[in-house]
Image: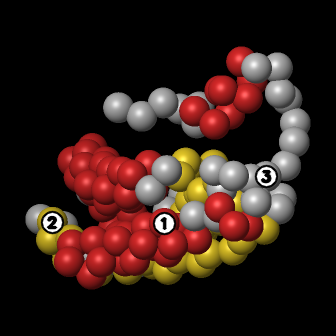
Amino acid sequence: MNNLIPGFIADKYSNGILSGSFYAVTMFMDISGFTPMTGALIKNGREGTEILGEILNRIFGPVIDAIHGRKGFVTVFAGDALSAVFISESGTPGGIPADEAARCAFEIKENFRRAGVIETKFGRFELNVKTGLSAGFP
């Protein structure tokens, strides 16, 4: 199980560092097809809502694992989207984990390519993912 507070932030806080800057890569991820699926499932009451919960776990579990596996952390969830940060270990562009963030985005895209068609008793739903990467100082 992953912590709710990223280790990077907890470490800084425990050392009395409450502000600062660092070089990082950020990733934004958005799922397309999620809103129509949600609407269709919640129309089916508790059973539809339970199926939606299972789908959320099945979708976001591997995404979060991919982010954490590449030494990133999720900064915010917004419905069917999220943002993540991959911090440079050296704090400089030379130590930037751009390759790790790009591999993570590719891994997430591949997971959706393989498992993006969701079959339920209430219908078939196709989900896809869009990701964007950016690098720099916050």
- Label 3 or label 2, whichever comes before in sequence order: 3
Residue ID at (74%, 53%) = 91
In this view, the mark in front (3 or 2)? 3
Task: Write down the residue under mark 2.
Answer: 120
Residue at 58%, 36% in the rendered image: 6
Q: Secondary structure at mark 3?
A: loop
Q: Report the quarter where the N terminus lies.
A: top left
Q: What residue is at 55 percent from the left and 48 percent from the top?
A: 73
Answer with the quarter of the image where residue 7 lies. Answer: top right
Q: Is residue 45 left or right of residue 87?
A: left
Quarter of the picture holding the C terminus: bottom right
Residue 5 quadrant: top right
Residue 42 shows in the view? no
Amino acid carrying label 1: it is Glu
Q: Which kind of residue does numbered mark 3 sit on?
A: Phe
Mark toward the viewer: 1 or 2: 1
Give how far across and how far down residue 8 sits, in percent. Answer: 63, 36
Vertical order, 39 against 133 (above or below): above
Is 96 located above or below residue 50 in the figure? below
The disc labelled 2 sits on which kind of residue? Thr
Percent across and percent down for residue 3 are 48, 30
How far across and how far down the image is residue 44, in percent? 27, 56
| Residue nearest the observer in this picture, 16 or 39 | 16
Question: Counting other residues with Cα less than 10 Å from the Cα at mark 1, is it few (<14), some (14-19), or many (20 or more)?
Answer: some
134 relative to 120, above or below: below
Disc number placed over residue 52 in the picture, else none: none
Q: List the residue tagged with mark 1.
A: 100
Is label 2 in a helix, a strand or a loop? strand
Q: Label 2 crowding class (10 Å Cα cut-off): few <14, some 14-19, many 20+?
A: few
